[in-house]
Amino acid sequence: MPTPDSHETAPPESLLSPDTLRLALDMPWKARNEIERLLLLPLARIQFALAGVVWGVGWKLYGLPIIQKHRRSTLTFGARLELRSTHRSNPLGPNRPVILSTRRPGASLVIGDDFGMTGGSIVAEEKIVIGNRVTVGANTIIADTDFHPLDALARQHLPLDGAIAPITIEDDVFIGMQSLILKGVMIGAGSIIGAGSVVTRSIPAGVIAAGNPAQVIRALESET
Ligand SMILES: CC(C)(COP(=O)(O)OP(=O)(O)OC[C@H]1O[C@@H](n2cnc3c(N)ncnc32)[C@H](O)[C@@H]1OP(=O)(O)O)[C@@H](O)C(=O)NCCC(=O)NCCS
């Protein structure tokens, strides 16, 4: 969940900060990404403002995401949001921008602090809730809807009426690249989803799950 400090004013960033200059020497491609990010910052802020989303503390957007928000839906992010939407923004070369969509009146997508995502889509027709410190690997899709109905006749008519069920992703979950998180799924706190998984059923907290359909591989060792 976004914390109360999520929308405080952050200090202005500079193209000539010591961090940017150090990056330019060690990893020139990262310096390029940082410069592009800072140049795009005004556009990114306008894009979120037009969608009615309040800009948060420490947000970093590499390239512009695509935001498809129904006027009467809710889209909320916590502090330190990090979205990578360009090919060069990550060594995995995301194949498209991050797309965030709340497609119906009353739909809600609520994401906590320290959320990171590279390429891919999150589509909420009813409700998707993502906790704090969640990392989503490149080109992953999270959708709480089947989009199209199972009945062949119904598929010929608008509005599209596929099954919908809310998704919850708890704190500290890490979702591997190229995964699909389907409707009605809950992923418990701290769990890891292996690369290329198709998650069709809920996954408990504190495990690694992977495959198609995703199955628990093993429990994560507790650090306490
Ligand atoms: C999930 C993951 C972190 C687990 O790593 P690990 O604990 O070292 O797991 P192991 O390699 O020991 O594999 C354990 C078992 O799970 C299986 N497995 C692991 N990852 C799998 C996957 N993505 N899909 C299907 N099965 C998988 C292995 O085949 C192995 O099965 P076995 O015991 O029958 O031989 C790792 O496999 C993974 O997916 N890494 C990629 C993370 C990623 O996407 N990063 C990029 C983010 S942008």
Image: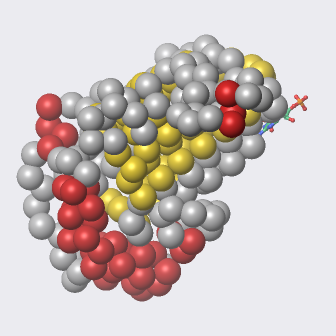
Q: Is residue 197 above or below residue 69?
A: above
Q: Residue furthest right?
A: 212
Q: What residue do we see at 40% from left, 34% from top?
A: 104
Is residue 95 rendered to the left or right of residue 59?
A: right
Residue 33 in percent (x, y) is at 42, 75
Instruction: Residue 171: name its quadrant.
Output: top left
Q: Position of residue 156 (x, y in %)?
A: 68, 36
- On the question of residue 132 being in view, the answer is no
Q: Position of residue 190 (x, y in %)?
A: 52, 25
* Residue 40 in view: yes
On screen, residue 10 above or below 23: above
Q: How many marks?
A: 0
- At x 74%, y 20%, the residue is 216
Question: Residue at horizontal 64%, vertical 18%?
Answer: 203
Residue found at x 32% / y 27%: 106
Nearest the camera: 152 or 96?
A: 152
The picture quadrant where one finds residue 142 is: top right
Residue 2 placement, left or right of 116: left
Which quadrant contains ligand 1?
top right
Quadrant including the N terminus: top left
Tell which of 90 and 141 is nearer to you.
141
Please determine whether, in this image, residue 106 is positioned above or below residue 78: above
Q: Is residue 135 left or right of residue 192?
A: left
Question: How did the renderer colour the structure?
Answer: secondary structure
Q: In this rendering, is residue 32 above or below 108?
A: below
Which sits in the foreground, 57 or 25? 57
User: In x, y percent, where is residue 215?
Assistant: 77, 21
